[in-house]
Amino acid sequence: VSTITIDGRVVEFTPGATVMEVALANGIDIPRLCYHPELRPSGGCRLCMVEVEGTAKPAPACGLECRDGMTVATVSDRLSAMRRDIIDLFVSEHPLACSTCEADGACALQQAAADVGLTESSFETEVTRTLYQDDNPFFIRDHQYCILCGKCVRVCDEVVGVNAIDYAGRGFESHIATPFDGLMIDSSCVFCGSCVQVCPTAALLPATRLGRGRDEEFTRIRTICGYCGVGCGIEYALKNGEIVYAEGHADAPVNGDFLCVKGRSGWDFVSSPDRLTQPLLRRDLAYELGLTEEPWEVPDTSPLASRKADLGGYLPVSWDVALDLVADRLAGVVTEHGPDAVAGLASARCTNEENYLFQKFMRAGIGTNNVDHCARLCHASTVTGLGTAFGSGAMTNSIRGMRDADCLLITGSNTAESHPVIGYEVVRAVKSGASLVIIDPRRIPLVDHATLWLQARPGTDINVFLAMMHVILREGWADEEFIRERTEGFEDLAAVVAEHPPEAAALVSGVPADLIEQAARLYARGERATGTPNGDSGERGRSSILYSMGITQRSNGTDLVRALADLAMLCGHIGKRSTGVNPLRGQSNVQGACDLGALPNVLPGYQPVADEEKRAAVAGVWGVSGLPAEPGLTVVEMMQAAAAGRIRAMYLMGENPMMSDPDLSHVEEALRTLDFLVVQDIFPSETALLAHVILPAASSLEKDGTFTNTERRVQMLTPVVAAPGEALPDWEITGRLAAGVATRLGRDGEARWRFDSTADIMSELAEATPSYRGMSHKRLAGDGLVWPCPRTDHPGTPILHTEAFTRGRGRFYAVEARPPAEQPDEEYPLILSTGRILFHYHSGTMTRRSRGLDWREPRGFAEVNAADADAAGVLDGKPMVIKSRRGEVRTQARVSDRVPPGVVFLAFHWKEAPANLLTSDQGLDPVAKIPEFKISAVRISKPARR
Amino acid sequence: MGMTLREMVHEIGGGCRDGREFKAVQLGGPSGGCVPAGLLDTRIDYEDLKATGAIMGSGGMIVADETTCMVDLARYFLAFTQDESCGKCIPCRVGTRKMLDLLNAATDGRATAADIDRLEGLCRTVETTSLCGLGQTAPNPVRTTIRYFPEEYAAHVEDGRCPAGVCPMGGGGEAA
């Protein structure tokens, strides 16, 4: 064990650690202004200098590596005098306006000055940096307070990787600058606010806190972000019950101090005047029930037709009236048409407790397995693909491990925009020397950091994966021991990949054969960007695969996922830290909604409904005599069944299929065909406007419970603000509704529906779900737990498949290279790919009601290559029509080299240009039943003059 | 190497122009130090120069005679290093600036004895805490002139007088 002595205390250190790290880890404080534990030392503030025995001059602790036997003093007369001088110098160029400063009480310089007893500078004060910039709604830059610590520059470079700001000028003229000292929006800034987070003074402040008072006036509440599946911990500063601003915090196990723009600034939707605050009854029903004297005819205009939601067709009613009516109608459909005439969509945005209760209601209350949710539309093929290959359809490794990988292979994931904080992990890995291989048709932002970019034509990535495996086997880079000891089915795979040499893949994909070979080499050997695996040891390095919906939202999604699993097993890159196959899940609790059985074929914990023993076990926990054994319908099948009249009633919790499902014209037709539709949401979504009853729900910022993030970490939510009006948490609504339905179906006293708290639900949930069995709200406080966690003394499992695969041996699948379901042709010569952009989220219900996010991207646009735009006469920034066999949309063209010729990209956030009017609900993946959102044949044109 | 400063200045260099009296030699460029007449027998090598408070540095020598004000000379060299500062670390970026302010005050006749103490303190902080060689050596001309020519500093701050008659002393002192 290596030790150093700090201020007389002997402490241990791990080689490579700095004196600062070791001191702070041992509770020894060292003055500092430019140090941040997540950033490389800069050494600019000189405050952390310490005396080192045997050295004449003091040295900065932040950059001083520990040596065994070193003796260090953090306090001496000399150090005290120098620190005072240094703080004096800082203060000499900093206005001492503390009493009126926004950062009063939260300023590191103020604290440092107080620590040495300095109330004013002994020098002439000379404030020369005077920039004040409030050119964006996210943050202000007030450079008179800047102390040039450079943390903002470093975080923008080392973590976010966009380099929007840097030092400009020299010496006393140094300042932090955007390119040419221009506006933030003209820089590469992604408005994540990480610079604001690390700023020690008032030089960078969240715009929303201006004029709201001092730090000490704010209360602080921590919860988990409600947007994507990364599961960032966020701390909200509140005053009088209102959010003032949000920030990361070092204790957050996934993100630490850092957040993306949505997490940090996208919270203001909670107080939007559009929030649903009362149960609403459609006026025709209200008239029928005698609640109003005015008759009402349901208009046939589509909810997609107007940008503003029109609730004129609805009458506010009490919860009792609303829930009685819903219970009557649902029970009526069950009695008349049988339980399988009812279907429910749970929500990847609701908590584990709520999803658990929802699927329990559908199965034990209604009596059907017709329960699914939008995971069907994003990662169903992960669940089927990885489930069959490994035995578990989730990320195999942890997010924090990514920064230590030697090689990262990213395919079908626009990580920096869709999972920005995981993007930060990727940037950090690259900055410390890892290689980055990106296989994607689009020039996604992370391509700027890539060692290799394989721009495969849409739909041809399968050929590239097979060719990479061909090269790996040909060159002897496979991990034969791993294949022998841990897997099965290798021979079948080897036979298939033998037929896919890189030259053949190059012809199909457009990726040069030598690029495929280099990618195979980097990944298989785990080589770093310098070409040396694992720190020159010659051993295989650590390689990790990250993928997302570019892989899964495909007619061969299950095959593609299996191909990635094959690739990982072939090289033994699984079951060890910083390796694995890592599907990045899209929504805050999509992992949990799947885990807790909001899927038609499995009970909580992925226990097949068809398995009699598992079914009986769950029925036992629920206190019911039996559960339906036949797997239910998936999302897309539900819509098709509704259109065909086989589904008569639907219960939707926090889902917006009128934006998110393929072929929206069909979806609308199906939903209008229903006898009864009830939608529970926080906003009057496009889907809600087709409902008979709308129930107002609390958002994730207004309730407790748990979310399971993409790395399988179950984390606690804490209510931050009060729900508006009469809105209730989803679990309370579902519980009350289920109890009402049970009464009407004569099932009182069977399953339990009313719970006192989410903790109460968690107790039952844990009993019913083997992988969550060891969890309770008490245990989940702090860092949470990563499933599987089968016992109450089990620490959780951050890395899966370490000794054996969940299914025993890993199974190789000999996948074939199948082309997409719909190919471009003469009539529809381009390929449309749908997805997300950084500043908006899913169907936009929340982000488009957030001031800053809406400011940054206020209207829909589609990316089109200059060649295709020219051919169609479409101009940059001008309207463009995109037409497929299903429909057409009109949107703004953004001519961009982010897409290659032949490809158009349109995000699905835009109500005024709904991408899913164009996509198809045919050609589903045969196993996962996922639609091919990523490939539709379209054509573009200039709109006709009106 | 190895010859004395005296040999270099008086024999090879030919001594001061117009028979003026030698006062000091600045060694090693702007970050070097000023060596007074009393140390002219110092040998020109790394160790011996260092012992005087100067450095070998660039190897350059600038000879000052009686018409040069040592406070003004220190101010001149510091203005140069201050201008060269990259700005990354605070002692160099702001510390040299404040030292220059104090020297400007001295040459303007606005400074007090306490300011010279402050200047000496800053010399220590800047040279000990600066990140790179520029800041670490920038105080050398100031330190050495204070050390070897304290009377010139005293004349400026106490008597309001520039003995060499160089400084404007606009602060009230008469140009001698």
Image (tube, coloured by chain):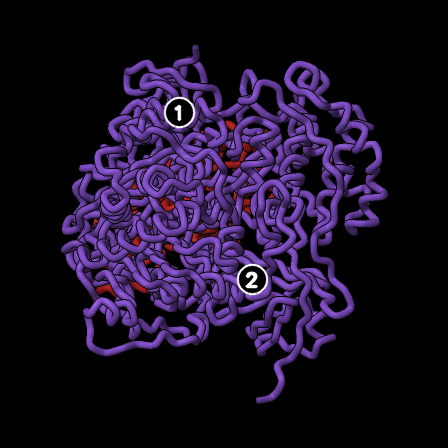
Q: In this view, does A449 lie to the left or right of A56?
A: right
Q: Position of residue A304 (x, y in %)?
A: 45, 70
- Find chain A in the image and tell me its colour: purple
Q: Can you see residue A792?
A: yes
- The label on residue A616 is 1
Q: Which chain carries label 2?
A: A
Q: Can you see residue B65?
A: no
Q: In which quarter of the image is the C terminus of chain A?
A: bottom right
Three-letter code for the amino acid on which mark 1 is drawn: Ala
Q: In this view, does B117 lie to the left or right of A136?
A: left
Local crowd size for mark 1, using a 10 Å CA cut-off: few (<14), some (14–19), many (≥20):
some
Q: Where is residue A250 in the image (x, y as percent from the top left)?
A: 33, 37
Q: Where is residue A655 in the image (x, y as percent from the top left)?
A: 40, 54
Cα–Cα span, label 1 and label 2: 38 Å
- Find chain B in the image and tell me its colour: red
Q: Residue sitting at 45 percent across and 63 percent down?
A: A673
The outermost residue toward the bottom is A946
Q: Residue sitting at 65 percent across and 52 percent down?
A: A923
Three-letter code for the amino acid on which mark 2 is drawn: Asp
Local crowd size for mark 2, using a 10 Å CA cut-off: few (<14), some (14–19), many (≥20):
many
Query: Which secondary structure lies at badge 2?
Result: loop
Q: Is residue A441 left or right of residue A595?
A: right
**Can you identify the residue that label 2 sits on?**
A663
Above or below residue B138? Residue A245 is below
Q: In which quarter of the image is the N terminus of chain A?
A: top left
